[in-house]
Amino acid sequence: MILKPPAKLPDPPPRMVFLAGSIEMGSAPDWQAQCGETLSKLGYTVLNPRRDDWDTSWEQRASNPQFRGQVEWELDGLVLADAVLMYFAPGTKSPITLLELGLFAESQRLFVCCPDGFWRKGNVELVCERHEVPMLDTIDDLLTAVVNHLKRTEHR
């Protein structure tokens, strides 16, 4: 199952993976579609923040209910997920993903892919190194690492 905002998050949560990373419309490929399909076929619930009905005219302020709902959905999903898959697409800035990297670096549930071409790759590498976050070279490697983590932690 793949859930996108504003879908209600499951309670109690099943085994879930959050797809954090580059979304910038027009700059970032829809890498979430590939990852979401692969993970959902394996029986995991996938939280994909790439909203189908995102409206760029929404004011990005806490007082805006649509914007608040999106951000709260993402923050709640990040906390509930058994694994957070994070992809930094080359050619993007991804400031929210950088923020989420800092928020969840110590979670022991974060897996990162940051290919050459991402403007702050060095910063991402150093944060991952310091917090022992697995940093993978490709999306396929990232998916493998996440699935292995989920299998190892299945009976916890």
Image (cartoon, grey):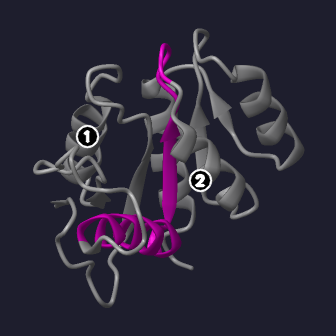
In this rendering, position of residue 143 left or right of residue 148: left
Task: Tell me what residue is drawn at x 20 percent, y 51 percent.
Answer: 51
Residue 44: where, in percent of width, then height?
29, 60
Q: CA distance from mark 1 to mark 2?
A: 23 Å
Q: Amino acid at mark 2?
A: Glu
Residue 112: where, in percent of width, then height?
60, 38
**Mark with earlier residue (1, 2):** 1
Residue 149 falls within the magenta-colored stretch: no
Which residue is at the front of the view, 96 or 76? 96
Secondary structure type for disc 1: helix
Between marks 1 and 2 in the image, the one whose residue lies nearer the viewer? 2
Task: Tell me what residue is drawn at x 59 percent, y 17 percent.
Answer: 118
Give the labeled residue for mark 1. 38
Quadrant of the drawing holding the N terminus: bottom left
Region in magenta: 66-92
Residue 50: where, in percent of width, then height?
26, 46
Task: Tell me what residue is drawn at x 56 percent, y 60 percent.
Answer: 152
> How many residues crowd mark 2 within 10 Å: few (<14), some (14–19), many (20+)?
some
Give the labeled residue for mark 2. 100
Residue 76: where, in percent of width, then height?
43, 75
Q: Amino acid at mark 1?
A: Thr
Secondary structure type for disc 2: helix
